[in-house]
Image (cartoon, rainbow, N blue to C red):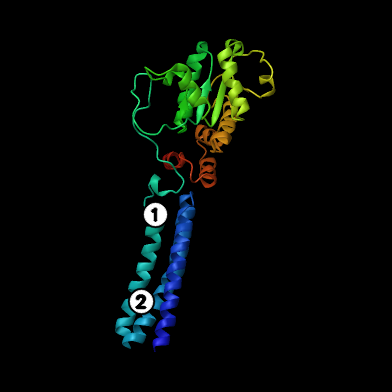
């Protein structure tokens, strides 16, 4: 009798483990109807297994069908409920491995005092001529909306050495985005910053106003943003792809395109390919709202 109980208990434990493993795999499916169908399939398969294992072990121990059948029903119900609970329990951002938490406090500006603690290098350093500040502000805000940490000289803090602050950020940024214009092409500052980005192999380039680029920057492709910054200009998606590749977040261009088109299939496909991206929760909320 002890061997029978051991075998039945082992079968019950194995079934429970498989149901939990399948539940966690189904949890990652972004398309809700598919997720529901797969959950029902797993529950239908493993609930009878749990009913049989719990009922049989109870019968072996007690010798009573009156006790074994209710115990089996309870075991099957618990297995089915556990499957649904694991799949559909709300998943917070901090529970998804590899997804950084987004700081919700105010961004630092020139008037924000520097707080103690380690400095965090930017994802994107923007180099530009001051004449193009309006367009650069628009670029910076769009990149920040994609949960990228962006730095340009509007973020300088009062009392900080101008040269040292720029040097610290540009030499640690994951991407140096140079915004070309006729003024930028003749600016020693912009050309110097572009040189650092090129030497570090983290340079991305955009053309805000048509101009002839000096060597060697004419060898680096600059996305044409002369017709505008944003989803209405397809060059914007190509620039995001370049930035995403440099900062370790591929698929930024595809995300922006899917959001702009409000294509449920494209959004779901992006979520399946990038489950750990900081934009995953935003994509989930958008998918539910469409």
Is 126 positioned to the left or the right of 104 in the image?
right
What quarter of the picture does the C terminus occupy? top left
Q: Position of residue 63 (x, y in %)?
A: 33, 88
Is 101 positioned to the left or the right of 132 in the image?
left
Q: Is residue 159 above or below residue 268?
A: above
| Residue situated in front as seen by the camera: 188 or 125 | 188
Q: Quadrant of residue 6?
A: bottom left
Q: Secondary structure at mark 2?
A: helix
Instruction: Assess disc 1: are there few (<14), some (14-19) or many (≥20) residues with their C-alpha within 10 Å of its C-alpha.
Output: some
Q: Secondary structure at mark 1?
A: helix
x 35%, y 72%: residue: 75
What quarter of the picture does the N terminus occupy? bottom left
Earlier residue among tags 1 and 2: 2
Q: Which mark is residue 38?
A: none
> Could you tell me how many numbered marks the image carries?
2
Q: Which mark is residue 72?
A: 2
Report if the CB atoms under discs 1 and 2 are less than 8 Å apart. no
Q: Position of residue 186 (x, y in %)?
A: 61, 10
Q: Is residue 224 visible?
A: no
Q: Is residue 165 above or below residue 79?
A: above
Mark 1–mark 2 distance (CA, rounded to whole Å): 25 Å
x 45%, y 49%: residue: 97
| Residue situated in front as seen by the camera: 205 or 191 | 191
x 58%, y 18%: residue: 192
What residue sits right under mark 1 in the picture? Answer: 88
């Amino acid at each position: 009798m002890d061997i029978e109980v051991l075998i039945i208990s082992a079968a019950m434990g194995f079934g429970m483990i498989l149901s939990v493993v399948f539940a966690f795999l189904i949890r990652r499916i972004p398309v809700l109807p598919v997720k529901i169908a797969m959950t029902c399939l797993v529950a239908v398969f493993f609930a009878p297994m749990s009913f049989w294992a719990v009922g049989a072990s109870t019968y072996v121990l007690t010798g009573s069908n009156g006790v074994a059948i209710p115990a089996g029903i309870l075991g099957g119900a618990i297995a089915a409920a556990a499957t649904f609970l694991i799949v559909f329990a709300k998943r917070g951002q901090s529970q998804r491995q590899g997804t950084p938490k987004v700081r919700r406090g105010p961004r630092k500006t020139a008037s924000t005092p520097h707080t103690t603690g380690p400095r965090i290098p930017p994802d994107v350093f923007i180099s530009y001529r001051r004449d193009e500040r309006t367009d650069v502000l628009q670029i910076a805000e769009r990149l920040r909306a994609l949960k990228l940490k962006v730095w340009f000289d509007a973020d300088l803090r009062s009392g900080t050495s101008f040269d040292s602050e720029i040097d610290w950020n540009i030499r640690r940024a994951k991407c140096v985005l140079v915004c070309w214009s006729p003024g930028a092409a003749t600016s020693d500052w912009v050309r110097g910053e572009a040189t650092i980005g090129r030497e570090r192999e983290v340079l991305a380039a955009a053309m805000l106003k048509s101009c002839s680029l000096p060597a060697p920057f004419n060898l680096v492709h600059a996305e044409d943003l002369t017709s505008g910054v944003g989803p209405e200009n397809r060059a914007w998606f190509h620039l995001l792809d370049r930035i995403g590749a440099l900062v370790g977040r591929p698929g930024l261009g595809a995300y922006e395109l899917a959001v702009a088109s409000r294509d449920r299939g494209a959004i779901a496909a992006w979520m399946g390919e990038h489950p750990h991206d900081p934009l995953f929760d935003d994509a989930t909320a958008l998918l539910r709202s469409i």
